Image: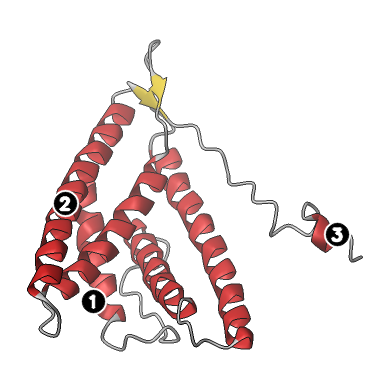
Amino acid sequence: MNFTALCNQIFVQSINDYHRTDNIDAPIHNPYLLKSIEYYLYLKNWIDTVQWHFEDLIRDPKISPVDALTLKRRIDKSNQDRTDLVELIDSYFLDKYKDIQAQPNASINTESPAWAIDRLSILALKIYHMRLEVERTDTTPEHLVQCQAKLTILLEQQADLSTAIEQLITDIENGRKYMKVYKQMKMYNDPKLNPVLYSKK
């Protein structure tokens, strides 16, 4: 099994596990060995899945301002957790390929492997939820046709992105590409960099 096939399999498993309760507060039961790449992939998608539902909830036009603010704080925390985990997955690749000698004409990719995998995780969620729309029996035929067309495109996009990630990994393994990871420098979460926070001291 290639790496993206493993990713897609674990993402489906995580999404299905979450929807057994469909509860943003449900505890995670990660079935993989702690600190293994499989463990991180499952955790990554679980965070994405919970955040997907955070984003649904905060768009409720009847949500109270207090509940909306509480939810916004949870979304901020989730975004930070997501970013931290992407960097952790990139650290796995950096360590795995640390002894690869880059070719003289090697180039850098526009994004690191883990940020591409981040998009693959989100695609798995889009596919799951678009498939639910296709299976609805309480809507119009036009809605179902539109959603089926979107699902077809999403599946094609998943296949294309999986192929691109595999090509990137192969290029890194063979020294045609090299990794250079710029850690996210989010300023608004840092009390030393966000003027709204440090001006309050």
Q: Residue furthest right?
A: 201
Amino acid identity at mark 3: Tyr
- Decide: is 168 above or below 4: above
Amino acid identity at mark 2: Ile
Circle 2: element type? helix
Where is mark 1, residue-wise?
16
Residue at x 89% of width, y 66% of height: 200
Where is mark 2, residue-wise?
153
Q: Position of residue 173 (x, y in %)?
A: 30, 30
Quadrant of the image occupied by residue 176: top left
Mark closer to the chain start, 1 or 2: 1
Where is mark 3, residue-wise?
198
- Decide: is 45 above or below 111: below
Q: Position of residue 126 (x, y in %)?
A: 27, 63
Q: Position of residue 89 (x, y in %)?
A: 43, 51
Can residue 2 be seen here? The reply is: no
Residue at x 40% of width, y 66% of height: 48
Residue at x 58% of width, y 44% of height: 183
- In the picture, which quadrant includes the C terminus? bottom right
Circle 3: element type? helix
Please identify, in this view, whether the residue under mark 3 or under mark 2 is nearer the observer: 2
User: Distance between the Cα atoms at labels 3 and 2?
Assistant: 46 Å
- Decide: is 152 above or below 166: below
